[in-house]
Image (cartoon, rainbow, N blue to C red):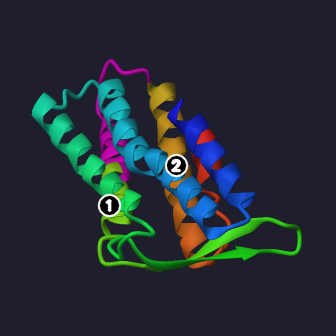
């Protein structure tokens, strides 16, 4: 459900005609951006038969909630984005040119941390004898890798459109 909501946010952003619409759409996409990586880590831990303490789950979700609250301040303060400009290409598709604020580093930092922890769990589970269904673990590893690669490619190539939703959908 969260992936569907985020995908609708991405569609709304690409069809936005004014900055306020695009910023609202962006905030919708960050629901998945903030909570999907940590949720995926919990799914990986369960699939790998690793018990995550409830207090650690609560702490991780609370921290992601804090990041989402900061995201909701976009357009009202400079914590997450110092500024954003809506650009529309020749085909009528819109995207944001963003100037990152001081707390934006929390988003990729936590995303990489959760994905790296999940990846380590998957590798550990594949290499050691366990009663875990190995093909399922390999599929999860592929999904994790695809998410990391899509984010890195998007940032390194300065692609104006978000390709991360493709990895979320897969």
Could you classify mark 1 by the number of other residues whose Cα lies within 10 Å: few (under 14), some (14-19), or many (20 or more)? Answer: some
Which label number is shown at residue 28?
2
Q: Is residue 51 magenta?
A: no
Identify residue for label 1: 70
In this view, the residue farthest toward the right is 91
Distance, label 2 to label 1, CA atoms, is 13 Å
Vertical comparison of 53 with 117: above or below: above
- Residue for point 62% across, 69% down: 19
Most foreground residue, 28 or 124: 28
Give the residues drawn in magenta, as a range: 115-133
Left or right: 75 as drawn, with respect to 124: right
Location of the N terminus by quadrant is top right
Name the residue located 27 percent from the left edge and 24 percent from the top edge: 49
Residue 100 spot, x, y in % from top left: 42, 78
Mark 2 residue element: helix
Q: Is residue 119 left or right of residue 66?
A: right
x then y, percent, for residue 36:
43, 42
Secondary structure, mark 1, is helix
């Amino acid at each position: 459900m969260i992936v569907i909501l985020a995908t609708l946010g991405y569609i709304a952003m690409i069809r936005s005609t004014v900055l306020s619409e695009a910023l609202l759409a962006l905030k919708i996409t960050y629901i998945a951006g903030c909570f999907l990586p940590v949720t995926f880590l919990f799914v990986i831990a369960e699939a790998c038969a690793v018990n995550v303490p409830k207090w650690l789950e609560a702490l991780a979700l609370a921290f992601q909630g804090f990041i989402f609250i900061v995201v909701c301040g976009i357009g009202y303060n400079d914590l997450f984005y110092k500024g954003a400009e809506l650009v529309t290409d020749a085909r009528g598709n819109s995207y944001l040119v963003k100037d990152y604020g001081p707390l934006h580093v929390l988003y990729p930092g936590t995303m990489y941390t959760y994905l790296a922890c999940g990846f380590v769990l998957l590798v550990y589970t594949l290499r050691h004898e366990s009663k875990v269904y190995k093909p399922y673990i390999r599929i999860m590893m592929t999904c994790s890798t695809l998410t990391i690669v899509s984010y890195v490619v998007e940032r390194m190539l300065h692609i104006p459109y978000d390709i991360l939703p493709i990895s979320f959908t897969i």
